[in-house]
């Protein structure tokens, strides 16, 4: 997971620096990275069976707690939204989907007390920086990220 986050950060840096010829490929790669992160978080933090839960709880602390893996994913994504906001709407929505998965795994009370305000601010800042053209161009390709958590 840390390597995927580092790769996503590196791609965001390249994209912000304006390598227009690679933007489509980099966007696709970013989407794949964030979807992989989402799938890993769901897989690594949710035991498959009660037996697995008993086994893993003795071996390691819960990864679903506020001190676990989902929390360590939130901070780099917030940093990308603030410092290197994606110009591709699909990439941004995929990042939001990953944050939604983190919020589910962290839990409502911890999410609201620790991350809610900061994440809302970062996403709002990203949205306000988008051009109307970029939103219109991608509106047909994007699934609603909120549908994935309902």
Image (cartoon, grey):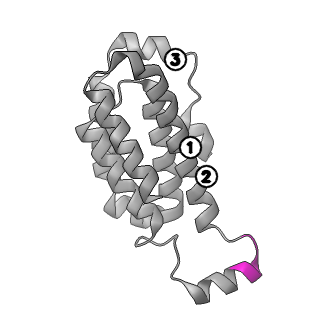
Q: What is the crowding at mark 2: few (fewer than 14 residues within 10 Å), some, or many (at least 20)?
A: few
N-term mark: 2 or 3: 2
Look at the numbered disc 3 and give the secondary structure of its residue. loop
N-term mark: 1 or 3: 1
Circles 1 and 2 in contact, beta carbons < 8 Å: yes
> Image height check: is 50 above or below 127?
below
**Horizontal side of residue 102 vs 19, given as left or right:** right
Q: Residue at x 40, y 73 (%)?
A: 67
Considering depth in this image, is 145 or 13 the residue closer to the camera? 13
Circles 2 and 3 in contact, beta carbons < 8 Å: no
| Residue 74 on image: x %, y % | 38, 55
Look at the numbered disc 2 and give the secondary structure of its residue. helix
Q: What is the crowding at mark 3: few (fewer than 14 residues within 10 Å), some, or many (at least 20)?
A: few
> Image height check: is 68 above or below 118?
below
Residue that carries the numbered disc 1 in the rendered image? 35
Q: Quadrant of the C terminus?
A: top right
Magenta span: chief secondary structure: helix
How far apart are the alpha carbons under marks 2 and 3? 24 Å
Residue that carries the numbered disc 2 in the rendered image? 39
| Residue 145 on image: x %, y % | 54, 36
Residue that carries the numbered disc 3 in the rendered image? 139
Considering depth in this image, is 115 or 19 the residue closer to the camera? 19
| Residue 4 on image: x %, y % | 46, 51
Q: Is residue 104 magenta?
A: no
> Image height check: is 2 above or below 46?
above
Q: Which residues are magenta?
A: 48-52
Q: Residue at x 50, y 17 (%)?
A: 138
- Please tell me whether mark 2 or mark 3 is closer to you in this view: 2
């Amino acid at each position: 997971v840390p390597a995927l986050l580092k790769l996503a950060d590196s791609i965001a840096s390249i994209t912000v620096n304006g390598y227009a010829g690679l933007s489509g490929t980099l966007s696709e790669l970013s989407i794949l990275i964030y979807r992989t992160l989402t799938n890993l978080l769901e897989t690594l933090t949710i035991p498959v069976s009660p037996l697995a839960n008993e086994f893993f709880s003795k071996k390691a602390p819960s990864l679903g707690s506020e001190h676990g893996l989902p929390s360590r994913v939130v901070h780099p994504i917030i940093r990308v939204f603030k410092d290197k906001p994606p110009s591709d709407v699909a990439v941004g929505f995929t990042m939001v989907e990953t944050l939604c998965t983190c919020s589910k795994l962290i839990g409502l009370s911890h999410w609201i007390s620790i991350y809610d305000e900061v994440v809302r601010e970062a996403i709002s800042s990203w949205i306000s920086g988008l051009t109307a053209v970029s939103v219109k161009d991608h509106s047909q390709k994007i699934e609603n990220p909120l549908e994935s958590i309902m």
